[in-house]
Amino acid sequence: MNLESLFSIDPYSWSSIATAIFCGAVVGLERQLRGKPVGIRTSALIVLGTYVFIASSMLVAVDITDPSRIIGQVITGIGFLGAGVMLSKDGSVIGVTSAATIWALASIGVCIAIIDSYVAIKLSFIVVAILYGVDILEVYSSAFTRGVHSKYSRWRNRE
């Protein structure tokens, strides 16, 4: 057995795996630094798992099934995972942003498998910009902290 075959993971690519872990870590770092439930490990595993499922579906697409059906099932499964991080507290639903982040992470994994790793990296930074940018807007403008957000801010400040 030669060294090349020892480290080969055909039909997957090491560069795509590294991209998946990097993209998940970029988004997960932002969440973890802010104490949110979807941190680096979870985010990296979501992107990596989605990439592997979609890349695998592309392999069997010729013989067995349509890969879009697999993508649909991954999206459904990720929706259930996202629903698990949401909960109701004092009349407010919290965790919706974490659930949406999980959904966006899965889409990045699909992008790595189907479109391009560079696009996935750019999307990861866009997700972080949205998560961080809106938080900055909430600090500087009271218009962004009305309704449910004001209840959540009061609840968060009590603890």
Image (cartoon, rainbow, N blue to C red):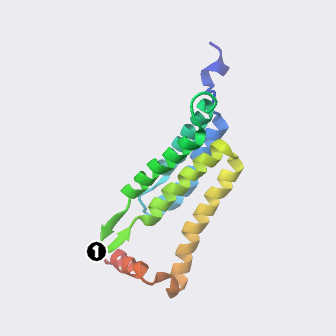
| Residue ID for mark 1 | 90
Task: Answer above or below: position of 150 versus 8.
Answer: below
Can I make out residue 118 in this image? Answer: yes
Q: Residue at x 28, y 74 (%)?
A: 90
Q: Residues within 10 Å of mark 1 (few under 14, many from 20)?
A: few
Q: Does 15 sit left or right of 130 as displayed?
A: right
**Extreme residue in the top direction:** 1
Can I make out residue 25 in this image? Answer: no
Q: Does 36 sit left or right of 69 as displayed?
A: left
Q: Position of residue 45 (x, y in %)?
A: 49, 45
**Extreme residue in the left direction:** 90
Element on which disc 1 rests: loop
Q: Position of residue 97 (x, y in %)?
A: 47, 65
Q: Residue at x 59, y 45 (%)?
A: 20
* Amino acid at dot 1: Asp
Task: Answer above or below: position of 86 versus 57.
Answer: below
**Image-quadrant location for residue 57:** top right
**Image-quadrant location for residue 83:** bottom left
Q: Position of residue 151 (x, y in %)?
A: 37, 80
- Which residue is more in the foreground, 89 or 6? 89
Q: Residue at x 58, y 55 (%)?
A: 26
**Extreme residue in the bottom direction:** 142
Q: For the N terminus, which image quadrant? A: top right
Q: Residue at x 51, y 86 (%)?
A: 143
